[in-house]
Image (cartoon, rainbow, N blue to C red):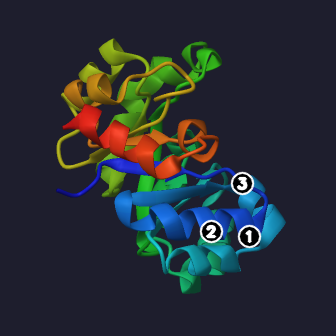
Amino acid sequence: MESRIVASLDLTDKEKLLALSETIGKQVFAIKINWPTILSAGKSIIGELSSYSKVICDFKLADIPNTIKLIAKQIADQDPYAIICHPFVGSDSLKELVSTGIRTIGVVAMSNDGASEHLNKHWKELLSDVKGAGAYGIIAAGNNYTLLKEISSQKEHLKVFSPGVGAQGGSAAESIKNGSDYIIVGRAIYDSADPVSEIKKINSEIQ
């Protein structure tokens, strides 16, 4: 059975990142990296990691269409599996990213407490825009089960990726139960003394 875990490896030590990715790459659905990793290791780290697993670039792009296109072009030759963006900047920017051919994942609801102040209140409009753009998936918090269930019930073809599991209080099993297709786990994996056992434990919870 394919794993439904996305390992969020927010590491800036390149050697440690590569060693961990080689160890766990076949046991997770994908590896997700963010700006701290890119800024410390360079964009070529995407290609290096892709030899171990699919790589999701968590750039949370939020800019005008031309800037988004330029960023996507910079990483296109590094074999990224998907790229994460913020749909709130408008459907033109979202469609521009989708048109690059890189799988696009739009943020609909985030897992931090402050997201409830503004972003999460507009999930319906954001979800509608992501659907309309022909994107691949959405980000919907895995530590807010009520909201996750409501969003997932309207996802249609989109894949739901859920952060907030582990260090932010969400449960892997409950997230899947409430509509997540994949859960995003970071610190619980990369801070563990035994990341492989941690992944096996989470996979067991999901199953």
Amino acid type at circle 2 is: Ala
Mark number, residue 23: none
Q: Nearer the viewer, mark 3 or mark 1?
A: 1
Q: Is mark 3 on a helix, strand or loop?
A: loop
The residue where tag 1 is placed is 15
The amino acid type, in three-letter code, at marker 1 is Glu
Q: Where is residue 82 in the image (x, y as percent from the top left)?
A: 45, 64
Residue 182 in percent (x, y) is at 33, 44
Residue 117's place in the image compared with 63, above or below, is above
Relative to 15, residue 36 above or below: above
Mark 1 in CB contact with mark 2 (< 8 angstroms): yes
Q: Residue furthest bottom?
A: 77
Tell me the element at label 1.
helix
Residue that mark 2 sits on: 19
Q: Using the numbered discs, state the Cα–Cα distance from disc 3 to disc 2 in whole angstroms.
A: 11 Å
What quarter of the picture does the C terminus occupy? top left
Which numbered mark, 3 or 2, is in the foreground of this view?
2
Q: Which of 206 and 83 is in front in this view?
A: 206
Name the one closer to the observer, 28 or 79: 28
Residue 94 appears in the rendering:
yes
CA separation in Å, label 1 and label 2: 6 Å
Decide if residue 39 is on the left or right side of residue 74.
right
* Image side of residue 111 versus residue 35, left or right: left
Which callout, 3 or 2, points at the residue further toward the start of the chain? Answer: 3
Residue 136 x %, y %: 32, 57
Q: How crowded is mark 2: few (under 14 residues within 10 Å), some or many (20 or more)?
A: few
Mark 3 sits on what residue? 11
Looking at this view, is 113 or 116 the one in front? 113
| Residue 193: x %, y % from top left | 60, 43
Instruction: Identify the residue shown where x is 78% and y is 58%.
Output: 12
- Residue at 30% of width from left, 42% of height from top? 203
Above or below, comparing residue 68 to residue 116 in the picture:
below
